[in-house]
Image (cartoon, grey):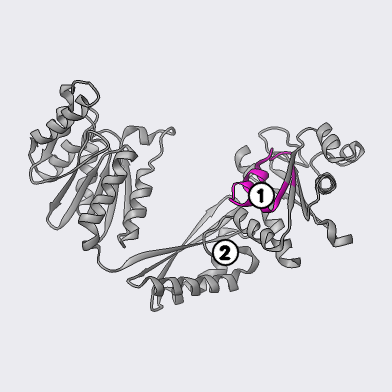
Amino acid sequence: MRAEIIAVGSELLTPEKADTNSLLITERLNEIGIPIHVKAVVGDDRADLESLLTQALTRSDLIVITGGLGPTDDDVTREAVATALGLVLDIDERIVERIQARFASRGLRMPDINRRQAQVPRGATVLENPNGTAPGLLIERDGRIVVLLPGPPREMQGMLDAVIRDRLSARAGAVRLFRRTLRVVGRTESHTEEAVAPAYAAWASGPVPISTTILASYGQIELHLTARAADADAAAAALDRAAADAQARLGLDLYSTDGRLLEEVVGQLLGERGQRIGVAESCTGGLLASRLTDVPGSSDYVEQGVVAYSNESKAASLGVASELIAAHGAVSEPVAAAMAAGICARARIDIGVGITGIAGPGGGTGNKPVGTVCVAVERPRLGSARTRVRTFRFVGGRALVRSQDVHAALDMVRRWVIETG
């Protein structure tokens, strides 16, 4: 089946409200082997929704519409769908009675406008809504299925699961979609593609075909592998082979073959070796410590974090010499190294990290523009080769620069632990 999603609501076309329903619908349909080919968001405009649905009916077997089933004038989904399908709307008095009972249970009278929610396109199946007043609807027309679900996630989710269980699973067939996310750091999108693309044809022509999508984001690249198979074990084996092939081509730059985040990978490496880490942060303001401790069980390997934002606090909390700052500037490799050494001196740890930089939007200079970050990793037990330090130049706004700072620091720790234990 080819599926399409239409999310209805003018609020979804503003910066304040995200369309999260489509993500859940996609996940649930993918689980039974139904891929999503098109997603659309449309405002509360009847003509626009009619046009979108008319187009969808020419290319998709299943159209799921979410939102626009409320009682007010801007809830236009029922009318638009009925018009697009050439169906008459009837009032279902049983729905009216259920809505009245729901209001009565709260000691309220049902407003007359709620009768709109009892409008049912002739021939449609009514989907019960135990969590709200708006019932869902399912319409079959010329071999196609149109499902109408309410917009509030609490109402939509249970209804979606019931439709999948009772109506769609049997029609989806035996083939299912199985996905694997590979995460890459230290390469651009084009360099990652250059290394892995020669394998795509072999992956796609195997006993279990695998399709690949590459996705770039700040600080990392993702490879999304999708296998279509009736046998879950065969799909898992095919994805394992593809992931191993990608690992051989990308080496240490591929840090996760099972979707885990970088902080999870670093945490596992530290935990397996019984090593503890401490962090000293300036421009990231505790974000590295937060990322590390977001992982359950991180108390096994996270010892301490210090936020030393001002030059005075770098001296007082970490022992960074004021003369060092005066000579090199707060954003410099010597100061980052001194911060890492300072956290190691303060706590009994195996690895110390120091981060200092210019997150912006101000503070940059010609020699040190916004996005300049120095990261140092200290390993006290390695003797003379105990410190590694790098300078990075990141782009983007303040939040993106800080996020990339943390990603770079975690990756430096990961590579060094893998290389030397």
Q: Amino acid at mark 1?
A: Ser
Please identify, in this view, whether the residue under mark 1 or under mark 2 is nearer the observer: 1
- Residue at the image position 31 percent from the left and 61 percent from the top: 32
The residue furthest bottom is 207
Q: In the rendering, which numbered label is found on residue 101? A: none
241 to 301, vertically: above or below: below
Crowdedness near tag 1: few (<14), some (14–19) or many (≥20) residues, C-alpha within 10 Å? some
> In the image shown, does 365 or 173 lie closer to the viewer?
173
Displayed quadrant of residue 177: bottom left
Residue 381, image x, y percentages: 84, 59
Q: Quadrant of the C terminus?
A: bottom right
Separation (CA) of disc 1 from disc 2: 34 Å
Residue drawn 71% across and 56% down? 412
Q: Residue at x 41, y 35 (%)?
A: 17
Quadrant, the N terminus: bottom left
Q: Is residue 43 visible?
A: yes
Left of 28 or right of it: where is 403?
right
Q: Position of residue 397 (x, y in %)?
A: 61, 39
The stretch of residues the image draws in magenta is 279-303
Q: Secondary structure at mark 2?
A: helix
Q: Is residue 212 left or right of residue 389?
A: left
The quadrant holding residue 307 is top right
Disc 1, SS = helix
Q: Is residue 21 magenta?
A: no
On the image, numbered disc 1 is attached to which residue?
A: 299
**Magenta region includes residue 284:** yes
Between 308 and 192, the one nearer to me in the picture: 308
Residue 192's label in the rendered image is 2
Image-quadrant location for residue 256: bottom right
